[in-house]
Amino acid sequence: MTNTRRGPRIFCVANQKGGVGKTTTTVNLAAGLAQVGQRVLVVDLDPQGNATTGSGIDKRHLPSSVYDVLLGSATIAEARQPSPKGGYQVLGANRELAGAEVELVDFERREKRLKDALHAVRDEHDFVLIDCPPSLSLLTLNGLCAAHGVVVPMQCEYFALEGLSDLVNTIKQVHANLNPELQIIGLLRVMYDPRITLQQQVSEQLKAHFGAKVFDTVIPRNVRLAEAPSYGQPGVTFDPASKGAVAFVEFAKEMVKRLG
């Protein structure tokens, strides 16, 4: 990939609606990008730490984490560690991160702590994927301020479009006030079942409204993707032949091609 931008491409995986597969998207896109030769860092900004455990890292025993990086007691180079099977690096998170909200309030540039920290490792990664919590918090704001764009995983369901309008408004506000680079990179249709008429209809609505912003790749509803986190690895490496894994590798290729 020819990356004309200095430093990595930094994307938030975000949706203000919970349960849409943000973490599944983050870890499997990371593993897919690693398979097509990209150097990837996953930043887990969710205190639940699901991207950390889903990458095969024990969140209860992190020597240092994204919490330490945000508060300035560790660098990303010190705190990141490799996903044992994913082929990418992880800046992990755990419950400790929930306290960062309160502790960051008195810091200068508190919404840009992650952006400043990432600058130090800018030559070491091609992609940085930030798994954001569903709520619009200071943590999410750190992600949005650090990112060049947002990848939005979406289920093709009735309420999905409603949640999307909230996210679009948030992105517009951050773009106007804090990060003029921020934009929607694309919408990824996930947990898709073509047999359900409503999902087909919502999918068509998305394409009609957002056009080229809707990724061509569609991630099917897939049991193996759902099982993989309990084995501490992305679905892409857990069962490479499964429909979900194949789709995520295709998505990684589409992402590289779009940005090349």
Image (cartoon, grey):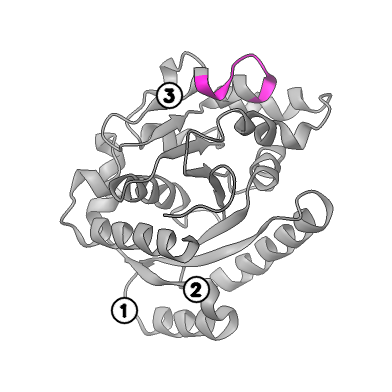
Disc 2 to disc 1, C-alpha distance: 16 Å
Question: Is residue 54 inside the magenta stretch?
Answer: no
**Regarding mark 2 in the picture, which secondary structure is present there?**
strand
Front one among 89 and 45: 89
**Regarding mark 1 in the picture, which secondary structure is present there?**
loop
Residue visible at 37% across and 36% down?
Answer: 88
**Residue 113 appears in the picture as rendered:** yes
Give the extent of the magenta segment. 70-77
Q: Which residue is mark 1?
A: 194
Categorize mark 2 by other alpha carbons within 10 Å: few (<14), some (14-19), many (20+).
many
Pointer 2 or 1: first along the chain: 1
Residue 59, numbered circle: 3
Residue visible at 23% across and 44% down?
Answer: 237
Q: Which marked residue is nearer to the observer: mark 2 or mark 1?
A: 2
The three-letter amino acid code for the residue at tag 3 is: Lys
Q: Which residue is mark 2?
A: 214
